[in-house]
Amino acid sequence: MSFARWSQVSDVIPYGRQWIDDDDVEAVARVLRSDFLTTGPAVPQFEEELMRATDSRHAVALNSGTSALHAMYFAAGIGPGDEIITTPMTFAATANAALYLGASVRFADIDPDTGNIDPDRVAEQITERTKAIVAVDYTGAPADYDRLRAIADRHGVALLADAAHSLGARYRGRPVGTLADASALSFHPVKPITTGEGGAVVTDDDVLARRAARFRTHGITKESAELEAGDGPWYYEQHDLGFNYRLTDLQAALGSSQLRRLDQFIARRREIAARYQSELADVDAIELPVTPTGIDSGWHLYVVRVRDAERRRVFFDGLRDRGLAVQVHYIPVYWHPYYRSLGFERGQCPVAEDWYGRAVSLPIFPALDDAKLSSVIAAVRETAATL
Ligand SMILES: *Cc1c(COP(=O)(O)O)cnc(C)c1O
């Protein structure tokens, strides 16, 4: 059985997609034939490799990016009455995970050039209840961590990263994983590497890592140094109210195999982005992404903005008609009815709302080859000419 570079079931080109090869299949098959299906030796092995990839002292693998955010917030001490400040230009999970803990969310508007959280707007949202600033590396481009760090330190709050898009990216030479007090990764199939479902918290903070690891398994510990009592070799204690958020060995083995190709994946994403940047530069109807100096993006997404918001729907439908399964990232989180029921109203982050109204994510994923990419670029040019 052989796996094509990109085995398609239809001619539709998605905005993002995994790349599974024979090594990945073999790695999972080896686990299936072994003694451990759920957490066994493959999980700590994957965690070791994640530490190396992110230059971090600890990695805690979890069963989704969402559970990684939940565990990270819990481990950072976020609880009832606390607030986090984050961007509305993200997947809802970034904010939801704070609500799970009884905390509340304040949204700070985005920078109109990068789409990332604007540090000036973050500073305006700080209150005496703020516990953490949560940056999201939107599209794979790290947020402005030096300025966010200065604000976090001035107010004595944590700086956390939702790095679901940005494994493998760099900020001023420093890798994602080292930019915040802790960072949450996602291994969903469209993300930089995949385990099917999966995620991780990476951090240099010993206490935060221990708390996240306990949270993953019901808040239970078996470490003798942590036990309050001791009754025998079977004994363990539950210290926190945690969950079953464990990654399986099947997934961890896939993650290790994928991580070996991370550099190759990112290099290909950069090539695709570079072709879009040069071959769409003269298309007046759309604005291309702007990457500030010092940012080496992982290019999880390639988001263009239609100049005339009134024409975004025409552009989107035209691309879909030409076989491109484009998407829009993101609906501002506080627009969702659930958030409206909490009292949020439209209009509070006008830059994010303008961004949402004009954004379209074009296909970008490592298995997209040059011939397919040429056809995508032709379709984008053709569609833009109708605007
Ligand atoms: C994908 C994603 C998540 C959630 O990750 P899952 O692995 O799907 O739970 C959180 N935040 C952002 C920004 C994401 O893109």
Image (cartoon, grey):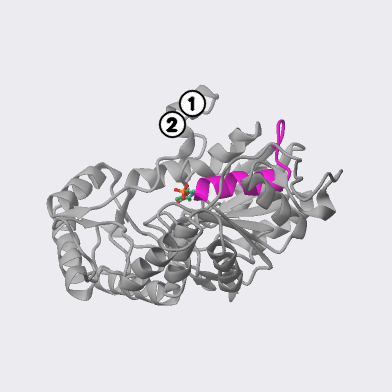
Q: Is residue 74 magenta?
A: yes
Amino acid type of the residue tagged 2 in the rendering: His
Q: Which mark is residue 336?
A: 2
Separation of marks 2 and 1 at Cα, in angstroms = 6 Å
- Report the front residue among 82 and 88: 82
Amino acid type of the residue tagged 1 in the rendering: Arg
Residue 53 lies, in percent from the top left, at 56, 72
The residue carrying mark 1 has its beta carbon less than 8 Å from ligand 1: no
Task: Examine the rendered structure and indicate whether residue 182 appears above or below residue 352.
Answer: below
Quadrant location, the N terminus:
bottom left
Is 373 situated left or right of 217 in this image?
Answer: left
Residue 114 visible in image: no
* Few, some or many residues within 10 Å of mark 2 (<14, 14–19, 20+): some
Q: Which residues are magenta?
A: 63-82
Task: Examine the rendered structure and indicate whether residue 317 appears above or below residue 268.
Answer: above
Q: Which mark is residue 340?
A: 1
Residue 91 visible in image: yes
Q: Residue at x 65, y 41 (%)?
A: 218
Residue 311 lies, in percent from the top left, at 23, 45
- Report the front residue among 33 and 166: 33
Q: Is residue 79 magenta?
A: yes
Q: Residue at x 83, y 47 (%)?
A: 227
Could you say whether the residue bearing mark 1 is in a helix, strand or loop? helix
Evaluate if marks 2 and 1 touch, with contact meaning CB atoms under 8 Å apart: yes
Could you say whether the residue bearing mark 2 is in a helix, strand or loop? loop
Is 183 situated left or right of 156 in this image?
Answer: left
Residue 113 lies, in percent from the top left, at 46, 58
- Report the front residue among 155 and 15: 15
Residue 372 lies, in percent from the top left, at 18, 69
